[in-house]
Amino acid sequence: MLDWENQNQAQKKRINKPYSFKLSSYFNDLFCQMYNKYIAKLKIIKFNNLNNCFDRLKQKLFQISLFFIAKKLNDSKINYKSAIKK
């Protein structure tokens, strides 16, 4: 019985673990916060093609994350508006 409870707790920890990528810690934290924030909203909505939706979401969040990193670094060579619109 105790072994089953431990497995159940371990499974809950895995489910609640934030989505993570092997990137720099600043980029990883920023990306995970944004991804998890929007995933919470997506649970309410039903999509026909869930994988396609998540791929588009990850792509959009990746672009927005790059925007914030570039803004933080004050890199004037990047066009911020075009990065978000794509």
Image (cartoon, rainbow, N blue to C red):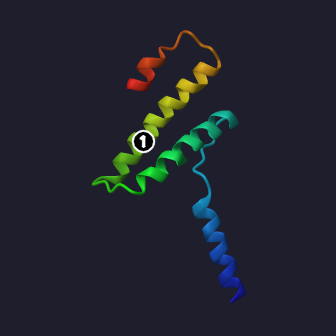
Residue at far top of view? 76
Q: Position of residue 82 (x, y in %)?
A: 41, 19
The quadrant of the rendering that contains the N terminus is bottom right
In the displayed structure, 72 sits above or below 16; it is above
Name the residue located 50 percent from the left edge and 30 percent from the top edge: 64
Decide which of 4, 38 is in the foreground and name it.
38
Residue at far left of view? 48
Left or right: residue 76 versus residue 81 is right
Q: Position of residue 34 (x, y in %)?
A: 54, 41
Question: Label 1's element?
Answer: helix
Name the residue located 31 percent from the left edge and 54 percent from the top edge: 47
Left or right: residue 21 versus residue 86 is right
In the displayed structure, 28 sits above or below 68; it is below
Mark 1: few/some/many CA within 10 Å (<14, 14-19, 20+): some
Query: Residue 25 lies in what quarter of the image?
Result: top right
Name the residue located 65 percent from the left edge and 18 percent from the top edge: 73
In the displayed structure, 47 sits above or below 81; it is below
Q: Position of residue 50 (x, y in %)?
A: 35, 53
Reading the image, the residue beneath label 1 is 57
Name the residue located 63 percent from the left edge and 34 percent from the top edge: 27
Instruction: Name which residue type carries label 1.
Output: Leu
Decide which of 7, 30 is in the foreground and name it.
30
In the displayed structure, 2 sits above or below 6; it is below
The quadrant of the rendering that contains the C terminus is top left
Q: Position of residue 17 (x, y in %)?
A: 62, 57
Residue at far right of view? 2
